[in-house]
Every structure is written in C-alpha cells, then in structure tokens.
Image: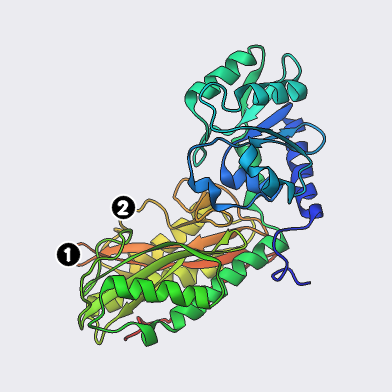
Amino acid sequence: MSELSARGFSVDEYQQRLARTQRAMAAQGIDALLLTTEADIRYYSGFLTQFWQSPARPWFLVLPAAGKPVAVIPGIGELCMRRTWIEDIRCWSSPDPHDDGVSLLIDTLRECLGEAGRLGLQMGAETSLRMPLASYEAVRAGLARTSVVDATSIVQAQQQVKSAAEIARITFACQAVSRAFDRLPEIAAAGDSERTIFQRFKHECLDQGVDDVCYLVGATAADGYRDIISPPSDRIVAQGDVLILDTGCTHDGYFCDFDRNFAFGKVDQATSDAYSRVHESIDAALDLARPGVTCAQLYQCMQSVLATKTDTTDSGNVGRMGHGLGMQLTETPSITHFDQTEMQPGMVMTLEPGMAYGDGRIMVHEENIVITDDGCQLLTQRAAAKIPLI
C-alpha cells in the first residue's frame, strides 16, 4: 500500500518523533511535556478528528521523559484515540462543571514528574493553551512543587522538519489544488458572482482529490484588489476585474497554502507590472533557498527585487513573505526581516511576497516549496509568468 493510499502514519514514524523530542527534553531537564492543542496532540499521537471544532471539552497528551505518551481525554474520544498507537488512554465524562479532567491530569502528571519535577509547556509565539484558565490554575495548585518551563523551541523544532511521508501528503494537496487552479478559466467568467466562483472552485478542489477546503479567501475588484482575507460577496464580476483566490486545502491532515491571480478580459498595465514583479521576486527566492539560508535572507532577497524593480519599497503591511507549512495552515518559522531560522532539508515553506502599488492596490503571490539537500523543490505547479486572462 502506498504512502498516499494508506491514511495516517506508521508506528515507526511516531516513535521517531517521540524519541527526538525526548532527547531534546532530556537536554533541557524537562521531566514531562504537556500538549493541549489539536496539531500538537495529533503530531505525537495520530489523533485526527474534526471534533476539535467544538470548544466544549479540553484534551491533553502527556509526553513523559521516557516511555510512550499518555492521553488524558474526554470519554467521547476514547474509541478514536484507540485507533492510534497510544495505549495508555485515561478518560473522564466531559463536560464536567466541577472537575473537567483536572484531577485526572494532575494524577497523570504526578506519575511523570514526581513531587518536584519540571513540566514543559509551550509559551512562545504561535502557541496557545487550550484549556480554561481556571483549570490550568487548579493544575498548578495541585502540582505546587513543580516548576513550569518553556518548551516552545522543542516542539516547534521537531515539527519544522518534515519526514518523507509528511512531505508526500503536502505534495498531494499542492498538486491537486494546482490542477483545480488550472481549470479556473473553465469554471469562472465575467457575469458570475464572487460567491459562485468560490463555490465552484471548492467543488473543483474536492473533485481533484483533497479531503477538505478548510481555507479559501480572496477578492475581485476593478483593475486590482485591496483586500485578500475576506469571504466572497454577491458582487458580480465584470470585464477588467482582477481575481485572487488563496486557499489552504488538506490531504490526510496536511495543508497546502497558495494563491493564484487572474484577470477577466483585460488587465491594466500597473497590475500587469505588479504581477510580474512579485513573480520575479519568487524566482529570486527559489534560486536562493537552500540549507543554511535564513528566513531573514529570503525576506531580503524578495524585498530587494520589489524595491529595485518598482518606484516604491512598500511591500504592504502583511509583515512577512512566507512561513512554514504542515499540519497547520501557517507554522513557524516566518520569512521576516528578523527571523534568523536557518533552512534545513525537509522544511516545507511558503514563499509569499506582496507589494502595494497604484492607489492602494496590492498584489500577492504564493508558492509552496520543500528545502532539499542542495536547494529547494517546488511542490506547487509554478504560476504563469504573466497574469492569466479569463
């Protein structure tokens, strides 16, 4: 059975993830790691469900210094968790207004920590604690002699470098959505509403094989757009409009994340030029991206093309020109002027330069790549060098 016909990952994959993390925990003297968010719990367990959409219940996974993870979860999730490689699954009936897993979690952590151990939690950027603050305070009170330390770098470093199996899933999503974008001129036309175009594109992505269209934003506007994160409206598309669609679709729990631009019938020169410039800036980044290159260097590379090829150095107010990609639509690191994270083989990144032009219009372009031993490889089908006309 191929990597893509078999859903989920081998036990060996999870064992390797855990072993790398436990070595990093040992180096920092951490006795147990507490995970509470969907992506982190899934990364170490394989627990894949859309039930996370409900905020009614907390979920916990404890990584001890040695041995397999321990799931502390609501009883409604027990059967799904038992389909993973996790064996020690401790459940309670949730929601419980008096003790929603708190005492069970305290007992589990005491087993792993002893009376005065060090508990790792993620505290840095792009992390969150998915449990009620009152419950967290009760856990801290129940572990009064435990010290809590920041384990952000441990978890993020593990997830930034993807295995071959993870890359295969992202590649599948990228290629499926690339095919859907190729068909856009056949399913969109002037006279359609934005809402209709978005719906047809979602259907096309599903027809091409993705599991879900979790994220789809964009806009249409005469001679260029000014907003790229809004849902579709009932606006009717006209000749001379520019369309951007930016989507994050999933395959087996892993995302692609890229956009494409189109013009209906004709395009003004300023928009055509802006499209060409952001396309050229990605070309420059593709030439540069390789192990050892930092996110800041990739940012400066793309920014320098925009600045030298236009009358402005304004790259808009987005703040970054790409990011990590995997189980989440956006992951660390970020391609910013300040992020000194070095590229490593196996990192999957988006390249996403944008620029402001004209009277407040913007142009954004995005591709997905994986860092290889000696450079990078496109996972998406490269966008046309000139904006396509519909």
Q: Is residue 375 above or below residue 112?
A: below
Whether label 1 touches label 2, CB < 8 Å: no
Q: Decide if residue 94 is on the left or right side of residue 5.
A: left
Q: Which percent across, then down, holds residue 306?
A: 35, 65
Q: Which percent across, then down, holds residue 35?
A: 62, 36
Amino acid tagged 2: Asn
In the foreground, 37 or 222: 37
Residue positioned 74% across, 26% down in the render: 31
Q: Which percent across, then down, holds residue 53?
A: 49, 48
Q: Is residue 283 above or below residue 78?
A: below
Figure quadrant of residue 325: bottom right
| Residue on which disc 2 sits | 317
| Residue on which disc 1 sits | 359
In the foreground, 133 or 219: 133
The answer, for residue 378, to whether it is visible in the render is no
Image quadrant in which the N terminus is located: bottom right
The answer, for residue 248, to whether it is visible in the render is yes
Q: Which percent across, then down, holds residue 4?
A: 69, 70
Tell me the element at label 2.
Answer: loop
Amino acid tagged 1: Asp
Image quadrant in which the C terminus is located: bottom left
Q: Residues within 10 Å of mark 1 (few under 14, many from 20)?
A: few
Figure quadrant of residue 72: top right
Tell me the element at label 1.
Answer: loop
